[in-house]
Each structure stands twice: as C-alpha cells, then as structure tokens.
C-alpha cells in the first residue's frame, strides 16, 4: 500500500534543505536560492531535456548522473544559465565547489539547477555567498519545522508558477518502511519531451542504479511526458532521483524483484505495471508513478495563464502506444485548448487532433464524452455529432477541471494526458517575461 504523507522533499530519512533570497533578479521578494543535502552519498539517476540547446546545468548534471553519486543540489531561479557558453558551465563548477566547501562534500557529486530567463550569466558571486549562508541554516528530516521548510523550498524554485508543487509517500519494501518526497516547478515551456520542468525526488531506498534509471525513464514517459502547456520544450528540463539507502532496506535490483531489464519499456509504448508478479515491484512502481503523476497533474493545472486543468483519457485502444499517441495529440492541440478556455463544445477539434496524430483508429467507431464535476455530455457518438444542449455543455465545461473521454472501441488499453486551456493571460505573461 502506498499512502501520502507530509514532509515534501524532507519526508525521506537523511536529507536537509534551506532556501533564501539572494537577489538574482532585482525585482521581487521571493526566495531564489535553494540548497539540498543528503546525509550520506546517494545513488542518483535522472532524465533531461531533449532540446538540442541544453543549459549549462543540464550538461553539468548529466555528468554527475553518469558518475552515479550525488551528495547535494543547488537550485537558483531568475536566470536559466542557458545559452551562456563556456562561462555558464564554469559557473556551474564554481557553484559546486562552493557547495563542496560549505557542506564538506565532493564537488563532482553536486547537482546544479537553474530556471528563469535564457541568455544572461548567473550572478555567481551572489550565489556562492548565498550557499555559504544556507549551509548554516539547513533543516533536516525529522526537525520540528521540516514540513514548513520543505514547503518553502518548493516555493523557492518557482518562477511563473502560482502554487508550490510537492508530494511525499510512504510504503513498505522487504518489510521495511520507505519514503519518497518530491518537488517540482513548471508552468511554461512545458511540452512532452522529458522532463518538462525542474524536479527533485529524494528517497531512502537502497536501489541499483541501472534498474532505477530504466524505471525512472519509463515512469517519466507515462507521466511528465504526457503533459503539455504550450508546445515548447525547455532548455533546462531536469528531473533527478536521489536515494540514500537510510531506510536500511536490502538493495533493490531487477533480479530481486523478478524483473527483466529488457521488459522495462522506456518508450512509453507498453504498460509495465504487471511485468512482474513480485509485490515489492508493484509497490515500488506504484510509489514512483504516484509521485510523478501527481506532480505532472500539478504542472498541467498551473500552466501559465491557465484557468482549467484539461485531462484527456483515451480508452478502448488496441495497444498502449495508440492510446498514448492519441491522448498526447489532443492535449497539445492549440485549437482544442482554446475551445476549453472558451467553454466551446467543439469536439471537431478533438477529432481533428486525433486524425493527424499518426495513430490508426476508426473515426466511425469513436465516441467523445466531456466530463466535469458538473456532469457529463456525449459530443461525438460513433463519429457523428449528436443533438445536445449548448446550455448543458457550457455548464459542464465551466469548472476548474475538464475531462475528455475518447473511446475508440478497438481494445482494452488506455492512456492519460494532461494540459490546460490556452488563455489571453498566457500571451500577456510571455510577452512581458523578461521584465
């Protein structure tokens, strides 16, 4: 059983965090620098942007993940440290060295992350001075104010986000109680192509790196890569998973869970929930999926300028790949997103997005139903537009979450994707982003 608990990124054993404002951008009052430390060196895996233009911290972190050990993370908001050349990479090294000196860790085991405006160099002197200050005020798992400080850290990594995004879960593996805590930021430049954000997952499992990396990629493909806000894939997308083993559970490997590494499909084209009958595998998968799905939905609902979370469920597919392809095509359609904003029951836009997705299906067998807390209404019946009440449709399309159920009646597979409506406010935010 996997249950939600309090604590955010400080839910698992052996982590500490602190955040503060150092003034990376002159305007504002928000905290803009965060420091995280693991009590002991942790196994680390990660997924990163597929954008060819990769920010300096992405390049730095890919090398840390390749080495497989992380001891600390430093995150700044305000400036992305992207398109900054050799100087940007050198600044990541300076940050890591400052963390190493302040916390007594190995600089090559320090992850760096940045988010904000692309182009400017980060004010590395402000950041390194801030790191020294943060090292003296860190709050650890189990401290009286751990829940509060974890929430403040989730706020400190925000840019245009309007709410912090965090989750923690508790579960049992091998008779031992284990925890995962995570936080992420993401509001704009969100589009399927891993990872669509900055995200940090901390756990107290002991887990073999190759298995963890494949499992993470597989779950990311089914959660974060099923989110789209605006069709833009960021230069800074990073999601890292640290696990320090302090739950004292025996090392988790694919073999110990009865899993073949070859069966862990990282493309998202096959369902991997039931590739092993081992209960510990099912629990581990459920925990990781629950954490990532929760954060993915939080990002979709907090898209820049969004007024509604838009969930797409494709059901009745002959295989998972078909369901996934159709769901992603619908949720990324700008015309569909605009219709959700305008409460316009124009399911022709959904049918159109399904038709150009590249997936094979029979339009004449397709049903589309729109749902919300206000009720449900079928807007496509076997490929045709039925009679319906416009007033009833507007009522159903008004609440904060709108769900489209698309049944293609061709099998038993399904997939979900998440996005938001496309609003005038999105344009306003991004027209004035640098100022």
Image: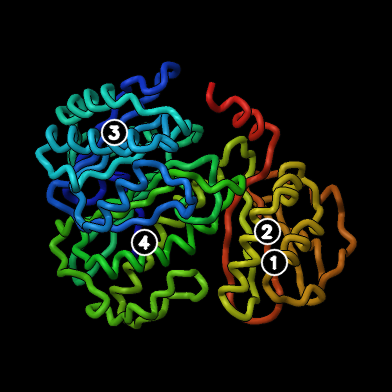
Quarter of image, res 347: bottom right
> Residue 65 vs residue 397: left or right?
left
Nearer the observer, disc 4 or disc 3?
3
Give the SS element for disc 1: strand
- Specify which label sits upstream in the sequence, 1 or 2: 2
- Separation (CA) of disc 4 from disc 2: 26 Å
Residue 113 percent coordinates (x, y):
34, 40
The residue indicated by pointer 4 is: 288
The residue indicated by pointer 3 is: 91
- Specify which label sits upstream in the sequence, 4 or 3: 3
Look at the image and tell me whether residue 294 can be seen.
no
Residue 362 percent coordinates (x, y):
76, 77
> Residue 342 vs residue 141: left or right?
right
Look at the image and tell me whether residue 191 can be seen.
yes
Give the SS element for disc 2: helix
Quarter occupied by the C terminus: top right
The residue indicated by pointer 2 is: 330
* Badge number at residue 146: none
- Separation (CA) of disc 1 from disc 2: 10 Å
Seen at 13% across and 62% down, the residue is: 248
- Specify which label sits upstream in the sequence, 3 or 2: 3
Residue 115 percent coordinates (x, y):
42, 36
Position of 182 relative to 377 (above/below): above
Nearer the observer, disc 1 or disc 2?
2
Give the SS element for disc 3: helix
The residue furthest front is: 86
Labels 1 & 2 near each other (Cβ < 8 A)? yes
- Specify which label sits upstream in the sequence, 4 or 2: 4
Crowding near pointer 1: few (<14 within 10 Å), some, many (20+)? many
* Badge number at residue 406: 1
Nearer the observer, disc 3 or disc 2?
3
Nearer the observer, disc 4 or disc 2?
2
């Amino acid at each position: 059983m996997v249950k939600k608990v309090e604590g955010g990124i400080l839910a698992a054993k052996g982590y500490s965090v602190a955040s503060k404002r150092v003034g990376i951008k002159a305007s504002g009052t928000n905290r803009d620098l965060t420091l995280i430390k693991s009590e002991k060196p942790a196994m680390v895996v990660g997924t990163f942007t597929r954008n060819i233009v990769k920010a300096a911290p992405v390049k730095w972190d890919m090398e840390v993940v390749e080495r497989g050990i992380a001891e600390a993370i430093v995150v700044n908001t305000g400036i992305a440290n992207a398109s900054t050349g050799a100087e940007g990479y050198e600044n990541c090294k300076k940050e890591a060295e400052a963390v190493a000196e302040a916390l007594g860790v190995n600089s090559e085991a320090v992850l760096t992350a940045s988010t904000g405006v692309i182009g400017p160099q980060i004010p590395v002197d402000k950041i390194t001075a801030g790191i020294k200050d943060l090292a003296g005020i860190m709050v650890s798992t189990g401290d009286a104010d751990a829940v509060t400080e974890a929430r403040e850290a989730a706020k400190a990594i925000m840019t245009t986000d309007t709410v912090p995004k965090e989750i923690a879960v508790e579960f049992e593996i091998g008779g031992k109680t284990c925890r995962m805590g995570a936080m992420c930021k993401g509001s704009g430049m969100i589009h399927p192509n891993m990872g669509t954000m900055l995200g940090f997952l901390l756990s107290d499992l002991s887990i073999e790196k190759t298995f963890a990396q494949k499992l993470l990629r597989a779950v990311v493909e089914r959660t974060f890569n099923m989110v789209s806000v605006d069709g833009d894939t960021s230069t800074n997308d990073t999601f890292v998973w640290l696990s320090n083993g302090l739950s004292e559970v025996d090392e988790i490997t694919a073999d110990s869970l009865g899993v073949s590494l070859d069966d862990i499909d990282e493309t998202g084209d096959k369902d991997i929930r039931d590739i092993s009958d081992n209960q510990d595998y099912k629990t581990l998968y459920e925990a990781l999926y629950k954490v990532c799905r929760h954060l993915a939905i939080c990002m979709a609902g907090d898209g820049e300028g969004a007024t509604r979370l838009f969930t797409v469920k494709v059901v009745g597919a002959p295989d998972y790949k078909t369901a996934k392809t159709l769901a992603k095509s619908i949720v990324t359609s700008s015309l569909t997103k605009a219709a959700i904003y305008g409460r316009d029951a124009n399911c022709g836009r959904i049918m159109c997005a399904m038709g150009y997705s590249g997936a094979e299906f029979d339009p004449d067998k397709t049903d589309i139903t729109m749902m919300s807390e206000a009720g449900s209404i079928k807007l496509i019946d076997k490929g045709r537009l039925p009679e319906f009440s416009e007033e009833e449709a507007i009522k159903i399309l008004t609440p904060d979450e709108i769900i489209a159920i698309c049944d293609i009646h061709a099998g038993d597979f399904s997939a979900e994707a998440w996005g938001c409506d496309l609003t005038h406010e999105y344009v306003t935010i991004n027209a004035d982003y640098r100022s």
